[in-house]
Amino acid sequence: MKTLTKSSACPLLLLLIASSSLCISTSHSQTHFRSTDQESFTSIVISQKGLDFVKDLLITQAISSMIPLQLPKIEKTVKIPVIGNVHLVASNITIYNINVLSSYVKPGDSGVVIVASGATCNLSMNWSYKYSTWVLVPIQISDKGSASVQVEGMEVGLTLGLENRKGTLKLSLEDCGCYVKDISIKLNGGASWLYQGMVDAFDEKIGAAVENAITKKLKEGILKLDSFLQALPKEVPVDDHASLNVTFVDDPVLSNSSIGFDINGLFTARENFRFPYQLKNLQPSVLCPDKSKMLGISLDEAVFNSASVLYYDAEFMQWIVDKVPDQSLLNTAGWRFIIPQLYKKYPKDDMNLNISLSSPPVIRISEHNIDATVYADLIIDVLEADKVIPVVCISLVICGSGSVKILGNKLGGSVKLNDFTMSLKWSEIGNLHMNLIQPIMWTVIQTVFLPYVNAHLGQGFPLPIIHGFTLKNGEIICSNSGITICSNVKYTPSRMVKSYTQIPVSQFAAL
């Protein structure tokens, strides 16, 4: 089978994207849609388990981007008994390892609080000293060496604010602090008196330097993460014709154990196309019965209907069938006993089946089914010499059912036929016996149309997931007027690390 010039495989894919059932008819639908960025048709909720996962990931990434961390040189003159005034210098102070023993994340009215406690870090540094003494003449004495420093009982806390800023997420640092409890210094070489002098001179200064350096790095990291979030595109391309509108709607909703986001979620044309129809905003809710899942994504049926409207209005929903498994069906000879007058007027001429939809398909989702109603005309064209002659137009209502499944970060599915009806719309060859034509229509639908549909449904369409994350062990739950995907996620560092540590970031993914 091949398509007309304006046809494509994707319209059919997106038309049936969420349907676990299919219905095709020539009657006109009364439901139409219009999209605005202020309406939400897709909701995402990150559970406490998901927040813990993100928190652990952010801590890992923060440590990875932070070390090795160079601290400023410290100088101090101290008075040592017997020795006198000694000028001490600690240089090349470097944090090369950080371990976090425990941490937690807690969303609330004031923002998202992340606390890491019982943390330790290891430092290396060089030390040197010099002082003057008198024998007969002044003599300057100096020495140098290395040291290792262990910081224990460190606590780091920050409070993050999240808000919607013109359709993107704005991340702000409301509060941030680092506290060091204990420091131990081990000198390699040096006189015995030097140890206590070093501790007295540098204990507090090294602790303060660690606190200031880590706080500064965290602030820089939050700015980069904010830039990453604001650089996420508001549209995700689906194909050459359509994009998914991932504009954020309203501020995130913070409870004591989850964070919820509302996005527009509708399909839009890539050339600033606007739906000329009214769309009902139902604000889908995310309900995952398995509380152990990290993520819930709820898609209102309006998301799938927006795809259907888009491709219908763009005139992509028509196909010409010129190849079928039983090729005799595309020659008038194969119809001589079914439509004798067709064979009599056009003996042994080849034929095409021209299928076009007469209104946008409407998809309905319920707890046990996902149904779609599509209105179509099937025209039988006779190919005579260089002419294409339309001879018969049949109105079809085809009803079926199917299933949806998760394909990585995509939602795919398949359809099977349940029943169909048909009626004669017009004829250039007189009246037809529709009961004789019905078995052939059934064969065409089963052997041509549905395999074509399922081939594209099997490719899936993207879900709103950031690059680097992949759904894992997901399940699909159907409810009245919506579908919810409840899933854990896994993380592949190669993409997000680059996005987190470099600015600007322009990559997003999903669906």
Image (cartoon, rainbow, N blue to C red):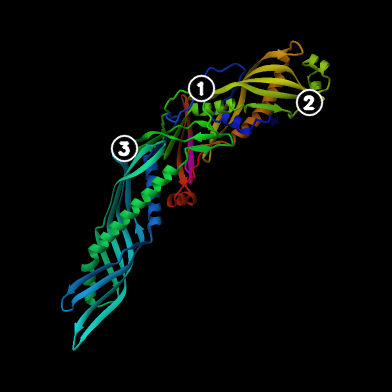
* Numbered disc 2: secondary structure: helix
The residue beneath circle 1 is 277
Place of residue 136 in the rendered image (x, y in percent of width and height, measured from the top left): 18, 89
> What amino acid type is highlighted by mark number 1?
Tyr
Q: Nearer the viewer, residue 184 or 320?
A: 320
Q: Is residue 373 visible?
A: no
Q: Which residues are magenta?
A: 465-475
Q: Quadrant of the N terminus?
A: top right
Magenta run includes residue 278: no
Q: Which mark is residue 328?
A: 2
The circle on residue 310 is none
Residue 291 sits in which quadrant? top left
**Mark 1 or 2: the one toward you:** 1
Q: How many marks?
A: 3
Name which residue lies at 30% across and 38% down.
108
Of the residues shown, which amino acid type is indicated by label 2?
Ser
Q: Earlier in the sequence, mark 3 or mark 2?
A: 3
- In the structure shown, which secondary structural element does the residue marked by tag 3 occupy? loop
272, above or below 83, in the image: above
Mark 1 and mark 2: span between their CA atoms?
43 Å
Which residue is at a point 33% across and 51% down the rendered structure image?
219
Task: Based on the picture, tell me whether residue 469 belongs to the magenta stretch.
Answer: yes
Task: Report, in whole angstroms, how far the alpha carbon at label 3 lies from the one at label 2.
Answer: 66 Å
**Residue carrying label 3:** 256
The answer to whether residue 327 is left or right of residue 41 is: right
- Where residue 242 sits: x, y (%)? 56, 34
Q: Main secondary structure of the magenta part?
A: strand
Against 358, residue 177 (above or below) is below
Residue 464 visible in image: yes
Mark 1 to mark 3 CA distance (whole Å) = 39 Å
Question: Callout 1: helix, strand or loop?
Answer: loop
